[in-house]
Image (spheres, helix red, strand yellow):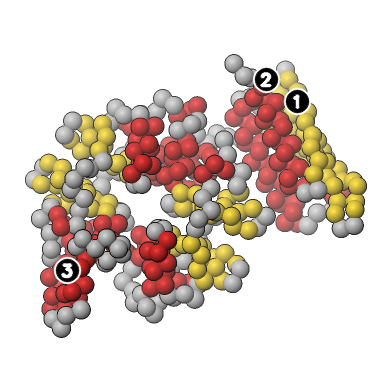
Amino acid sequence: MEITPIINDDFVVLQDEATVSELIGKLKEKEKRSALIFRNKKYLGLIEKKGLLHSKIDVTETKLKNHIQKTPLLSEHADIIETAYLMFQSNLSYIPVERNKEIIGMIRARDLAKLATELTETKDWKVKDFKLVKSVRVNKNDPIAKAIELMNTKKVDKIPVFEENKLYGIITYKDILRRYLNWSPKRDVSAKFNKMASSRSAEVDMPNLANLPISNFSTNDNLLTLNKEATLKQAVIIMTEKGVNSIIIQDGEEVLGLLTAKNILAKVGSLKIPVNYNIKFVGLKDLKLEQHEMYNLKKICSNEAFKLQRKIKNEFSLVVHLKSYDKQGTQQKFVVNLRIEAPGQTLSTSQDDWDLETATRKTFNNAKNALDKKFKP
């Protein structure tokens, strides 16, 4: 299954010489959590909103180039399992998607987790099958400074809040950014902060803000909780509908931990099976491709072969025969012939196109459609 259905083409772009305050304003305006950073037309990486919480910076002076996180780039036809593995290993919540060396969108962890529920391998998974995040805890009367310090030192984005031994609420980096740093236009608490911060006594008063109780900032009502016996599909539906990346998991009234989108991707990525095929190219050298063109072609064939492997479920070999013909001016037409050889079965498909990569993908798509018909119940 490909990631194509979940590619989001609504994303924020900024130059690396822009300041952090410009980033904050842009993210607030577009209601986004991350931005792609470029130097002219060259992609450098991304910055996530939550990363700013862990930085003590002068937002009006600090350039974005000092806080860029490098990322891999995905093909729009990348396989869901490979993508889940890559996203988990990269510790990212977002990854850009490219087409012909141009970024066309992004995918986010939560959407990928939802798409993963459509895989046959995950249909029977339950919440109790996942390794939950055993995060630190705070008391509702602890100062907000303690929650911020724990998020910084423990590198976590959310912490359950307790009243004695009973779950009271949850505090997230989003709660702090929205209310403490006045990130959102919903100024339910921040108006008081703004007034205090702009007063002459701000230097004295600001430390007092850090001493306000966590209960003033945490989400305390309508908490998203789920029983450990719930299915994965139930969990990701709630995440998607509520726009969150984690849910508190309980066994009765006992809090077991947090189920996060990253936990889900870790398990989906573990489905990554060993390569069980080999690919032989015929006519590749005759095309006289540039080095990067040859690399891209082989990468496409490898990714598509992985998808075929999940359908064939046996050892097999591929012969990719490449030809070019009908040259018209600077344009050249390509034909790709694919032969699949597995124990007791063979399959051949072909496709032509003016673009070699397109012809290759179409040929593999023909093969996948033929296999779907062959193995249809």
What's the residue at 64%, 31% (across, down)?
A: 308
Query: Residue 151: image x %, image y %?
Result: 27, 58
Query: Residue 231: image x %, image y %?
Result: 35, 29
Query: Residue 112: image x %, image y %?
Result: 47, 42
Determine the secondary structure under disc 1.
strand
Q: Nearer the viewer, mark 3 or mark 2?
A: 3
What's the residue at 38%, 61% (across, down)?
A: 49
Cα distance in 3D space between marks 3 and 2: 67 Å
Labelled pair 1, 2 in contact (Cβ < 8 Å): yes
- Residue ID for mark 3: 192
Labelled pair 3, 2 in contact (Cβ < 8 Å): no
- Residue ID for mark 1: 347
First in sequence: mark 3 vs mark 2? 3
Q: Nearer the viewer, mark 1 or mark 2?
A: 2
Q: Is residue 231 left or right of residue 113?
A: left
Is residue 137 visible to us here? Answer: no
Q: Is residue 358 left or right of residue 86?
A: right
- Residue ID for mark 2: 374
Direction bottom: furthest residue: 200
Determine the secondary structure under disc 3.
helix
**Vertical order, 194 against 169 (above or below):** below
Cα distance in 3D space between marks 1 and 2: 10 Å
